[in-house]
Amino acid sequence: MIQCKDLVKIYKVDDEHEVMALQGLDLEVQKGELMGIIGSSGSGKSTLLNMLGGLDRPTAGKCVVDGKDLLRLQPKELVSYKLESVGFVWQNNARNIIPYLTAIENVELPMLLKGRHKRERAKELLELVGMGHRFHNKLTMLSGGEQQRVAIAISLANDPNLLLADEPTGSVDSKTADVILGVFRELNRSLQKTIVIVSHDTELTKKLDRVVAIRDGKTSSEILRKSFYEAEDLLNEKEMKAEETHVELAVIDRAGRIQIPRDYLDSIELGDANKLRVELEDGKITLVNPKSS
């Protein structure tokens, strides 16, 4: 579904200054996968989401989504892509929902823009996300979690193959966040939608099968569930520990480089030094602080 290779995005601040938001990022997402992308503020995760959604153009590299090369799409093709191939769920509900329309009217709007208005389909989508009892409520009559569920229904209006969610649980409590993630899981299973959730919340790693961590504009690691969906219905997510259920793998780029977490470097008291000794012992690669030996 998604293939990014050496993806670069440079923003020009002024005539003399540029900011490199993505620095040769690589990413692959399989069709029908539900995955997360985490990273701190400024890591490049929101820039990546904008690239995947066709809201911004890559500066260089390869970005193919649903068989479409986003670097080479013409303006008209890009409009069609955003309307038909991808659905968005934003953290800020002002971007998701028009406040003076009812829930069902909001779901119908993307269909009207595409020229395929179907009220029955809008009802089905709201029922699918557990909002069948709120058809005629406006934004002010809905809780934060209910607004996000309506937003998910809106994102499905034109039956896109890919859903992109930007911090969908960022403005709700943990209980509501679990409900929203549960909706995404159900959509992934029942409709086989490919779903990418972007968040700064590291708790996401405990709740999804695969989470990619981005640091400084590059993919730094992947956190994978040891056994995908194994007895998931029997697991109590509140009691799960990431170290017991998941394994974190560092990502090696084409030049053989990996990003080492800062807390790892701090644990060997590297300080401000930028050199490590690399040793190969018994089939293991060891990084050693040269000052400690």
Image (cartoon, rainbow, N blue to C red):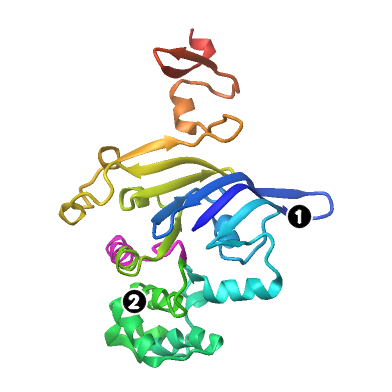
Q: Is residue 55 magenta?
A: no
Q: Is residue 175 magenta?
A: yes
> What amino acid is at disc 2?
Glu
Q: Residue at x 78, y 49 (%)?
A: 17
Where are the magenta residues, as a range? 163-182
Q: Which residue in the structure is indicated by mark 1?
A: 12
Tag of residue 146? 2
Height in image: 231 above or below 98?
Answer: above
Name the spot of residue 271 as percent of width and height, x first.
Answer: 54, 23
Disc 2 residue crowd, few under 14, some 14–19, many 20+, Cα 10 Å: many
Secondary structure under badge 2?
helix
Name the spot of residue 35 as percent of width and height, x first.
Answer: 40, 54
Disc on the earlier residue, 2 or 1: 1
Tag of residue 79? none
Q: Residue at x 46, y 50 (%)?
A: 38
Name the spot of residue 206 as percent of width and height, x first.
Answer: 31, 48
